[in-house]
Amino acid sequence: MPNPPAHRLLVLFAHPSLQRSRVHRRLLAEVAARPDVTLHDLYEAYPDFEIDVPREQRLLAEHDTILLQHPLYWYSTPPLVKQWEDLVLEHGWAYGAQGTALRSKRAVSVVSAGGREEAYRPEGRNRYSVEELLRPLEATWRLCGVTPLVPFVVHGTHRLDASGIEAEAARYGAFLDLLAAGGGEAIP
Ligand SMILES: Cc1cc2nc3c(=O)[nH]c(=O)nc-3n(C[C@H](O)[C@H](O)[C@H](O)COP(=O)(O)O)c2cc1C
């Protein structure tokens, strides 16, 4: 039996309309090409939002690095991610005096945004960077003793042509390999 990889990656994927996706559909192929990486499609598993909490907690416990992959929806996550947080990250399991299940794990957001990078600057129309907009998630991970990593962001999805999407997929593949090897930059 080969040794298990040092950093088991779990991709929690949330896209409310994958059938219309251009970017995440291609990013997912990078995940699928890596058999050591676990892909869990939340909208496929829970179209009715009825989340199986023990199953989700088991999945989290079995992995070292959690990737939360989704399109940016109104400067935030699609709604099923919020529902997942509310139900899965239970007091006494994920946080609180007895809640130590996630301690020493790592988490990172993998997000696509229609807006270009220039729009997500202090002088841009959205003012805040995607990393800043994702602070509630970062704070949530910190409360659970999880180390949040600097997000992987694909900007300007509306303007990406086929070759642009290929370039982002290659960048994502390299990012997955980096994480699997234990790399990745923690948010200070
Ligand atoms: C309901 C909804 C809300 C969105 N909100 C944002 C947003 O706040 N900021 C942004 O840059 N793009 C926003 N978008 C654009 C999506 O992020 C973009 O279409 C998606 O990242 C493209 O990835 P895909 O090809 O995998 O669907 C929104 C799209 C929808 C449908």
Image (cartoon, helix red, strand yellow):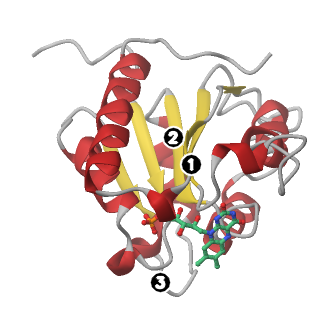
Q: For mark 2, what is the residue?
A: 67
Q: Residue flagged by tag 2: what amino acid is it? A: Leu
Which numbered mark, 1 or 2, is in the foreground of this view?
Answer: 1
Q: Where 113 falls versus 102 (above or below)? A: below
Q: Residue flagged by tag 3: what amino acid is it? A: Pro
Q: Nearer the viewer, residue 78 or 27?
A: 27
Q: Work out how far the residue at label 1 is from the one at label 3, CA to CA, in angstroms.
A: 27 Å
The C terminus lies in quadrant: top right
- Counting from the top left corner in percent of width and height, residue 162 is at 27, 56
Which numbered mark, 1 or 3, is in the foreground of this view?
Answer: 1
Q: Earlier in the sequence, mark 1 or mark 3?
A: 3
Judged from the image, the quadrant occupied by ligand 1 is: bottom right
Q: For mark 1, what is the residue?
A: 155
Q: Work out how far the residue at label 3 is from the one at label 2, CA to CA, in angstroms.
A: 20 Å
Q: Is residue 63 left or right of residue 163?
A: right
The secondary element bearing badge 1 is classed as: loop
Q: Residue at x 23, y 50 (%)?
A: 29
Q: Earlier in the sequence, mark 3 or mark 2?
A: 3
The secondary element bearing badge 3 is classed as: loop
The secondary element bearing badge 2 is classed as: strand
Q: For mark 3, what is the residue?
A: 47
Q: Work out how far the residue at label 1 is from the one at label 2, CA to CA, in angstroms.
A: 18 Å
Q: Residue at x 65, y 33 (%)?
A: 101
Q: Earlier in the sequence, mark 1 or mark 2?
A: 2
Q: Where 185 falls versus 64 (above or below)? A: above
- Counting from the top left corner in percent of width and height, residue 22 is at 35, 66
Q: Residues within 10 Å of mark 3 (few under 14, many from 20)?
A: few
Mark 1 C-beta closer than 8 Å to ligand 1: yes
- Counting from the top left corner in percent of width and height, residue 164 is at 34, 47
Q: Residue flagged by tag 1: what amino acid is it? A: His
